[in-house]
Image: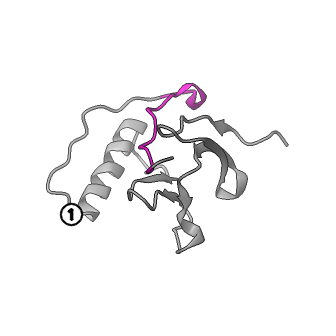
Amino acid sequence: PPPPPAMELPAGIGDVATLRELWGGAVTVSLPSSYNDVSDVRQVPDNQEVFLCRETGASIIFELLDLEPGLDDATSATHFFNDLATANAAAESAVTEVRHFPDVSTLLPPPFPPCGGG
């Protein structure tokens, strides 16, 4: 079978990126090496991958969501965002934009928050 898709994401300032496997290797991602896999110390839901900087408390969370029957992509994204805001008792929340990216390999997110001295 072909190798899993890789997402190349920039490391935090002064940090080195390390290739990590998500969901048993179904997806790989380049993350700052200073972020630790939370599942090494506590249980994480099967649909999530969580990485934490012990020094600053910054976290990087990947989450798989099911399609919501009867909702298009944009409406589904807003639904899950609002569901998360409600579950966390957010004082306020707003969806300002929903965009569709047909080829996620072209996405370049901003650098991750620095994790201490790197």
- Looking at the image, the residue that sits furthest to the right is 1
Nearer to the camera, 10 or 98: 10
- Looking at the image, the residue that sits furthest to the left is 91
Left or right: where does residue 21 sit relative to residue 101?
Answer: right
Nearer to the camera, 39 or 96: 39
Tell me what residue is drawn at x 36 percent, y 51 percent.
80
- Above or below residue 106? Residue 20 is below
> Residue 93 location in percent, x, y?
20, 48
Tell me what residue is drawn at x 47 percent, y 48 percent.
117
Left or right: where does residue 45 sit relative to residue 68?
Answer: right
Q: Can residue 109 be found in the magenta stretch? A: yes
Name the chief secondary structure element in magenta.
loop
**Magenta extent:** 101-116
On the image, numbered disc 1 is attached to which residue? 89
Tell me what residue is drawn at x 32 percent, y 57 percent.
84
Count of labels shown? 1
- Looking at the image, the residue that sits furthest to the bottom is 42
> Residue 107 location in percent, x, y?
52, 28
Describe the element under mark 1 as helix, strand or loop. Answer: loop
- Above or below residue 24? Residue 6 is above
Within 10 angstroms of label 1, few (less than 14), some, or many (20 or more) residues? few
Q: Can residue 18 be found in the magenta stretch? A: no
> Residue 95 location in percent, x, y?
25, 39
Amino acid carrying label 1: it is: Ala
Nearer to the camera, 118 or 103: 118
Q: Residue 18: which quarter of the image?
A: top right
> Residue 111 location in percent, x, y?
46, 35
- Above or below residue 13? Residue 90 is below
